[in-house]
Image: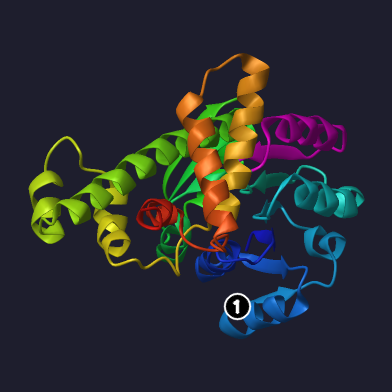
């Protein structure tokens, strides 16, 4: 059995680590809140470690799915001297490309491979093992981690060198941000026009306007339901990363910057934990 460690058991990491255990990997988990790790152990075949260092000891493959750059830096810093020589650390956190490049260099000095591998597909994708994974790093490291990632993924694409997985995730979030604002305006317009939203969606979802967001979020947007899904707080973090990178590379992201401000409005409404489709709330609440 290949020994694996999984660091971070949030709404994504918890089921991802579970899929690894179900596929026969010898899994050790770590979570900052011990109760979450204990809960995971009661539901899956694996053990919990008290510290990141204890979790990674002897592991051939180490995975993480954390919150932001400081979380990743803290966990890697705590475990750096405990990685097995030749191990590969795959970070599924959506973090900055600059951090990915730094970790690649730091871990290489320790004889450890690094893959930045942010994911798309949300909680449902993690639970159903249908995530899309975008990878940056050395090809040999990506291929070493690939069989394990296949336990919870429907698609794994090696984009390029270290940091390119995170750059790809930024593209993903840029596209989603603009799409969700357009969908919000369309659903809002339909409501104000007094037309049947169910029939509208039936009519347009088979044409050029079709998208995953339309199929999975338009009806809940019309019903004013947002207590699920990918939180606005996390989307703003992701857009902050994208906008910071754009300032570095000269990309022009006027719509993304505007939608980021709109998400700030949603946060001000108390919607930090609402799904990202809650952009429509700021339209419906303004008369």
- For the view shown, which residue lies furthest in the front direction? 287
- For the view shown, which residue lies furthest in the bottom direction? 42
Give residue 96's quadrant in the image: top right
In the displayed structure, does residue 280 sit left or right of residue 15?
Answer: left
Identified at 82% across, 61% down, the residue is: 52
Give residue 246's quadrant in the image: top right
In the displayed structure, does residue 97 sit left or right of residue 153?
Answer: right
In which quadrant is the N terminus drawn? bottom right
Q: How is the image coloured?
A: rainbow
Is residue 24 shown to the viewer in this render?
yes
Q: SS for tag 1?
A: loop
Identified at 72% across, 81% down, the residue is: 35
Q: Which stretch appears magenta?
A: 95-116
Identified at 65% across, 80% down, the residue is: 41
- Spot occupied by residue 18 in the image (x, y as percentages of width and height): 55, 69
Name the one closer to the observer, 162 or 269: 269
Name the one closer to the observer, 84 or 218: 218
- For the view shown, which residue lies furthest in the top direction? 250
- Spot occupied by residue 206 in the image (x, y as percentages of width and height): 11, 44
Identified at 28% across, 67% down, the residue is: 223
Taking the magenta stretch, the answer to whether it contains residue 219 is: no
Residue behind mark 1: 45
Report crowding for label 1: few under 14, some 14 to 19, many 20 or more residues within 10 A (C-alpha).
Answer: some
């Amino acid at each position: 059995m290949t020994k694996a460690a999984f660091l971070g058991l949030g709404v994504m990491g918890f089921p991802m680590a579970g899929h690894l255990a179900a596929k026969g990997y010898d899994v050790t988990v770590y979570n900052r809140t011990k109760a979450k790790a204990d809960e995971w152990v009661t539901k899956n075949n694996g053990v919990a470690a008290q510290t990141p260092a204890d979790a990674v000891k002897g592991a051939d493959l180490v995975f993480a799915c954390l919150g932001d750059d400081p979380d990743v830096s803290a966990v890697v810093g705590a475990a750096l001297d405990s990685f097995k020589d030749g191990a590969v650390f795959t970070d599924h956190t959506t973090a900055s490309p600059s951090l990915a490049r730094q970790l690649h260099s730091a871990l290489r000095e320790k004889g450890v491979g690094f893959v930045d591998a942010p994911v798309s597909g949300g909680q449902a994708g993690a639970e159903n093992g249908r995530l899309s994974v975008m990878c940056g790093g050395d090809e040999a490291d990506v291929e070493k981690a690939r069989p394990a990632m296949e336990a919870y993924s429907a698609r794994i694409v090696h984009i390029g060198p270290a940091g390119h997985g995170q750059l790809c995730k930024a593209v993903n979030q840029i596209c989603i941000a603009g799409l969700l604002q357009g969908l919000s305006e369309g659903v809002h317009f339909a409501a104000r026009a007094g037309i049947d939203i169910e029939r509208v969606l039936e009519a347009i979802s088979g044409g050029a306007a079709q998208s995953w967001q339309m199929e999975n979020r338009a009806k809940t947007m019309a019903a004013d339901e947002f207590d699920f899904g990918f939180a606005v707080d996390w989307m703003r973090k992701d857009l902050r990363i994208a906008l910071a990178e754009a300032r570095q590379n000269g990309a022009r992201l006027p719509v993304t910057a505007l939608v980021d401000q709109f998400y700030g409005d949603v946060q001000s409404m108390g919607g930090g934990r609402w799904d990202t489709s809650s952009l429509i709330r700021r339209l419906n609440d303004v008369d």
